[in-house]
Image: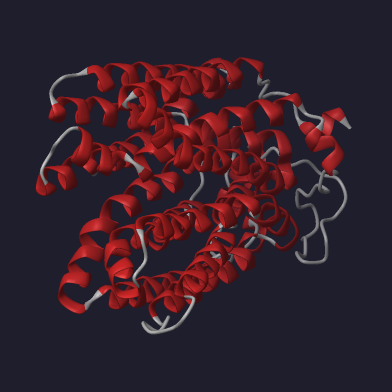
Amino acid sequence: MIQRPISHARWFLVFWLFVLSAVAFLDRVNISIAGSSIAADYGLANSQLGYVFSSFLLGYALFQTAGGWLSDKLGPRRVLTVGVVWWGIFTALTAIVPSQIRGALFFFVAIRFLLGAGEAVIYPASNQFVAWWIPTQERGIANGIIFAGVGVGAGITPPAIGYIMFHYGWRSSFWMSAIIGLAAGFIWLLIARDRPEDHPSVSSAELHFIQSGRTLSSSEPLSTATISPPGANVVKSLPWSTILQSENVWAVTFSYFCYGYVAWIFFSWFYIYLAKVRGLNLKASVFYATLPFLAMAICCPLGGAIADRMTQWRGKRVGRCGIAVVAMTMTAVFLVLGSRVASARLASVVLAGGAGALYLSQSSFWSVTADISAASSGSVSGFMNMGAQLGGAVTASLTPAVAAHYGWTASFYVAAVLAALGALAWLAVNPDRSLAATQ
């Protein structure tokens, strides 16, 4: 019988990954709040401001796989530390672009692109941490807590940035974001280790519990970037040919593309939809626009906890894949119903329910990639997350185009169809089939 862990170092580190997740969204959402002030100071048109917004997403998508590969090779401690420092630097650089400089648009696009490239490491590195630190029966709730930072970060950013802008100006809001990020990254460097075997606060009982439920198997040592004590569970990285030939990888990547398309409607267009289409005033729009992010923050850990419980009861096929199928199907239903509700406020609540339902499935994506790819979980999850960001990039242009030609209801219908397709893709995923077994 497995002895229950005495120490709980893994959960403190999971909590700090939640903090870093919230900081990441603070750094990426702050410009949407300060955008109008920046446009006024530099004489940027809305279309030019759109280039600035899109440049972040492009950098973020393109460097997902590279960020995952670096996490596999160097470990999540160093990669995340460098990443958070990178975010802080480029967030601060946003605040020091001179007002009278020629070619300001180029500088903002370049800065946001490089910020996106740096932020690309956050979730692949987190998933590499989960692969080493979290036994498979706890990965749902761990990923749920980490990704709850998305909702919290996106939810607190508008009032926090708005307050600082009102009292101290938009540049001060970026300095504040940079300082918070640098402090969080420094603490991570101090408290984190790549593996539980190397952490002084992990008791022998907790270490045994982690190792007994870890999907990594004994093989040959990792690169010299990490030093393995005798008897530690280690495994070599998988070749990309194996990863790219996996039906599991392509199925979860396609589903995550659909997921990203739906999620970025809320990040990019929901506030505008409430204000300009539904006719809510400024105060009401701000209030109701936060509901999706609150739903995300609540449903992320809830979905992870349900997935873990179902996995222990009925296995991974039901606990990981089944939860994702049901959650994304519910999302499609909420999107259709919410877009047709006559009351603006009720529509906001129903559509926020769609965002919450979507995030019930979040932990399934990251838990399955950690389960099937072991020490290559950073690379595999980075590849998968690239799919989600490409989905978000499609949303940025397709959603307003569909709305302009066919109305906003049609835009939500398109998102509902993609949510349903994402649910169907999970039927092709076999979470019990490791990529190492296909070599």
Among the 4 quarters of the image, the one containing residue 269: top left
Residue in view at x 40 percent, y 74 percent:
178
Along the line of sight, the residue nearer the viewer: 248 or 344 = 344
Along the line of sight, the residue nearer the viewer: 217 or 298 = 298
Q: Can residue 19 be seen in this view?
A: no
Position above or below: 214 against 39: above
Residue in view at x 57 percent, y 44 percent:
134
- Quarter containing the N terminus: top right
> Taking 279 as reference, is 311 left or right?
right
> Taking 344 as reference, is 211 left or right?
right
Q: Position of residue 161 (x, y in %)?
A: 26, 65
Along the line of sight, the residue nearer the viewer: 38 or 28 = 38
Along the line of sight, the residue nearer the viewer: 269 or 188 = 269
Residue in view at x 41 percent, y 29 percent:
402
- Quarter containing the C terminus: top right
Position above or below: 105 against 334: below
Q: Position of residue 135 (x, y in %)?
A: 59, 40
